[in-house]
Amino acid sequence: MQFNDYNHTLTGCEFRDCGIGVNSTGGANFYVRDSHFERSKVLDIRVRGEHAMSVRRCTSTGSRMFIEEATIAPLTVQDCQVAGWANPTGAITLGSGPVVMFDCVFANPPTRHPPIVPSGGQHLILSNNKSTGTDGLLKPDASPNITEIPAGKLGGSLASPQQTFFRDTARIARKVFDVKRDFGAKGDGQTDDTFALQAAIDAARKHGLQALAYLPSGDYRVTKTLEVTGRDWRLGGSGTHSRLLWHGPDGGMLVRVQDPEDVTMENLDVGNAGMQKNAIDILQTGSGGQTRMHYERVWVFGMYRKQAFVKGLQCRDLGPRAVITADHFNGNLRFTDCSRASLLFNTSFEGAIVVEGQESRRDGLLGFMTRLATINTKGLYVKDSQNLVMSDYYVESAERMMEFHGNPGDPEGRVTIQMPKSHCSQNPVISLQNYRGRVALGPSMFYPGGVKPALITQQGENPCEFILMACQAYEVAPKFEFGDRGTLTLLENTGTGMGKNEIPDGALHQVAAALDDLRRLGALDLELNYPRR
């Protein structure tokens, strides 16, 4: 409801018989996904935020309207199904910011009026949308600034406008092993609690059935790596009040996670507090078998540190049968040779991301949905022409935003990033150094801040395609310095210094491939977080 009130995520929700389901006023921005609306008397979602927002995989039945937007900020509407809206003039009205809408289905309209009502001159990117029973998706003369993208190889993931996501059951610990009560840990920051911690971990692992090795509030001194393996159990504490502190040899490792099967780490500070001398907070590895690990409210080193390659969660050599999901993970993240795994970060905050590795097979997915990073040297490093998909990546107060590296002989990589806000203080804001493949950026509130113009550079012998689409440049114009092997596509951008579209041959198919990345991310979200009942 207030200005400077950002990054609200609503997921797995249900709204029934509301006036307005999600009401954003002031300057707040949000991301609504995997949620269902029924019979909203005014509308399902009001969009007023000053940074980009998204509505993904939502369903609506019997509401007056689905979305009402009035903002200069960009908006993404992905894979939504809307049926039986009551407003005779449309289901969605749009403001002045650029919009990307794809895989949306509209059915059972009140009139033949098209469901989408853009403002005059609206910049729209549309792909694979359907509206039955109306005279098209929008009026033929609705806007001169519309680009239709080919459908791509994939489509939406939703089954019907009646599909719901709200879960009315939850898994809870069947047995609690309290590290203080049952194993004598002190948690006073002075006593060596390593043996007690490992004993509680081993007891929960042996018991299984979602047993919890529980760390009450305290500072737990650790001198030897804690080993986490096994299946069907949990390791957790009381959030930032339960802290693991390294007091072993310099360069040590706090926690090693090896071949977990349905294991959860939750509500725990692992190496974030202070400047301990360990090299790794959490190392997760696999030996090729079926594994699944969930991180829920875990803090590691990285927040406000400007040390991207230090400590944090490091994942190495995770194969095609490895799965990670994470909610509210805070701190540095580093992925080495994990390009065959399914790694989904639902919400993650702060620190920096490093993606690297020589594995040439890229049939997995490293995906981020809600992601916020502030006060970084750079918030994202993609090396070795690796792949990455991020649907809502908010960057503020970084020195530079991101860089991409490649090597001779790399397989083609693909990076697709949609950014609510892109803000930094130094040039180049984005650099592509011999990256091979495609990097697609946008929609975004393009707002570098202290640099005018905002420089985006490309160099190297590898061919690289860079796409900037549906961005709103706020007071800062982008400037591109590309080498002979770089190809630039500009598509439906608005604001300061944004000129006309630049669409090289084949570029729209590259945009379709970028939308396919977001479709893969959405399908993985539903598969791992909301399996059909």
Image: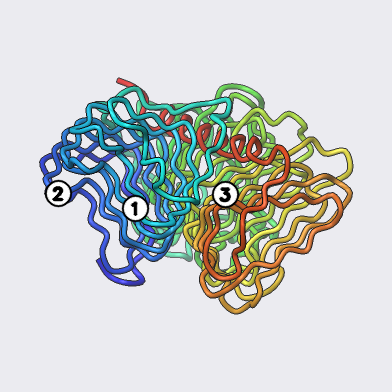
Of badges 2 and 1, nearer the viewer stands 1
Tell me, for residue 94, which label it has, or none: 1
Of badges 2 and 3, nearer the viewer stands 2
Of badges 3 and 1, nearer the viewer stands 1
Tell me, for residue 42, which label it has, or none: 2
Please, is residue 202 above or below residue 25 in the view? above
From mark 2 to mark 3, how far is it between C-alphas?
Answer: 33 Å
From mark 2 to mark 1, how far is it between C-alphas?
Answer: 16 Å
Viewer-proximal residue among 29 and 268: 29
Viewer-proximal residue among 506 and 38: 506
Please, is residue 74 above or below residue 505 in the view? below
Q: What kind of residue is marked 1?
A: Leu
Name the element at disc 2: loop
- Give the residue at x 28% y 69%: 26
Q: What kind of residue is marked 2?
A: Val
- Give the residue at x 43% y 38%: 264
Please, is residue 421 above or below residue 200 in the view? below
Tell me, for residue 355, which label it has, or none: none
| First reached walking from the N terminus: tag 3 or tag 1 | 1
Viewer-proximal residue among 305 and 342: 342
Q: Is residue 330 at all visible to an observer of this figure?
A: no
From mark 3 to mark 1, how far is it between C-alphas?
Answer: 23 Å
Name the element at disc 3: strand
